[in-house]
Image (spheres, grey):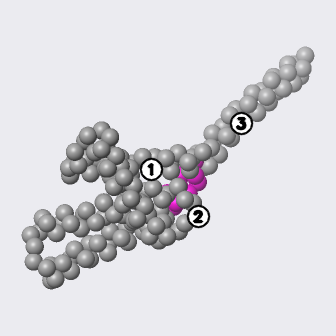
Amino acid sequence: KEMNKMNRNSKTEEPADREEQAKTEPAETEPAERQEARTEMQEDFKKLLAPLGYTALVITLLFAASFFIASARLLDRILFFAALFFYFILPGYCIMLHVKKLSGLERLTIGIPVGVAALNLVMYLLNVLLGIPITAATVILIIAGISVTCLLLSQRAQTT
């Protein structure tokens, strides 16, 4: 009788152990899979941002060289070179993130005219259709809106 009880207890313990193992195994492998996906996304993000970083470096070097070439106030120089980056480069690069076949430099090169065209079109339509005046604040908001929207859409496309 005691052996039968022990056999019954051991039989009932085994499935419980198996269930516990089944519960713990996916939990252990899931964070590893998430970690791999996270590192892969970080590497992709670094690849996407590398051309923007190089462009910002070139613009910074041009800014430093401008002290020797032209005489202007410091604030005017800062605004000019910041406008180069934010007006010409950032919106087009963000728009071109949807084209997967392009490398970073190609995306940057094609993105500059695309961004300028999109920005000018949006500013024109807002001014003509809605009567919103074109000021520095509206231009900054439009650039931020285009860039953030395109970044969110590209992130959404990558996750699906």
Q: Position of residue 106 (x, y in %)?
A: 49, 70
Q: Nearer the viewer, mark 3 or mark 1?
A: 1
The outermost residue toward the front is 128
What crowding class fits label 2: few (fewer than 14 Cα within 10 Å), some (14-19), or many (20 or more)? few
Q: Do callouts 3 and 1 mark residues in contact (Cβ within 8 Å)?
A: no
> Which numbered disc flags the more N-terminal residue, 3 or 1?
3
Q: Is residue 98 left or right of residue 15?
A: left
Specify the principal SS of the magenta part.
helix
Q: Is residue 155 left or right of residue 89?
A: right
Per the image, the residue denoted by label 2 is: 101
Q: Is residue 50 visible?
A: no
Q: Do callouts 3 and 2 mark residues in contact (Cβ within 8 Å)?
A: no
How far is mark 3 from mark 2, CA to CA?
A: 44 Å
Specify start and end residues of the magenta stretch as a single range. Answer: 34-44
- Mark 3: which amino acid? Gln
Q: Is residue 159 above or below residue 44?
A: above
Query: Is residue 22 or residue 61 the one in the foreground?
Result: 61
Q: Position of residue 57 (x, y in %)?
A: 32, 72
SS category of the residue bearing label 3: helix
Q: Quadrant of residue 120?
A: bottom left
Query: Is residue 133 or residue 50 the one in the foreground?
Result: 133
> Which numbered disc flags the more N-terminal residue, 1 or 2?
2
Q: Nearer the viewer, mark 3 or mark 2?
A: 2
**What label does residue 150 carry, if any?**
1
Q: Is residue 152 visible?
A: yes
Image point (31%, 64%), residue name: 85
Image point (16%, 69%), residue name: 77
Q: Position of residue 71 (x, y in %)?
A: 10, 77
Per the image, the residue denoted by label 3 is: 21
> Which numbered disc flags the more N-terminal residue, 3 or 2?
3
Q: Is residue 136 magenta?
A: no
- Mark 1: which amino acid? Cys
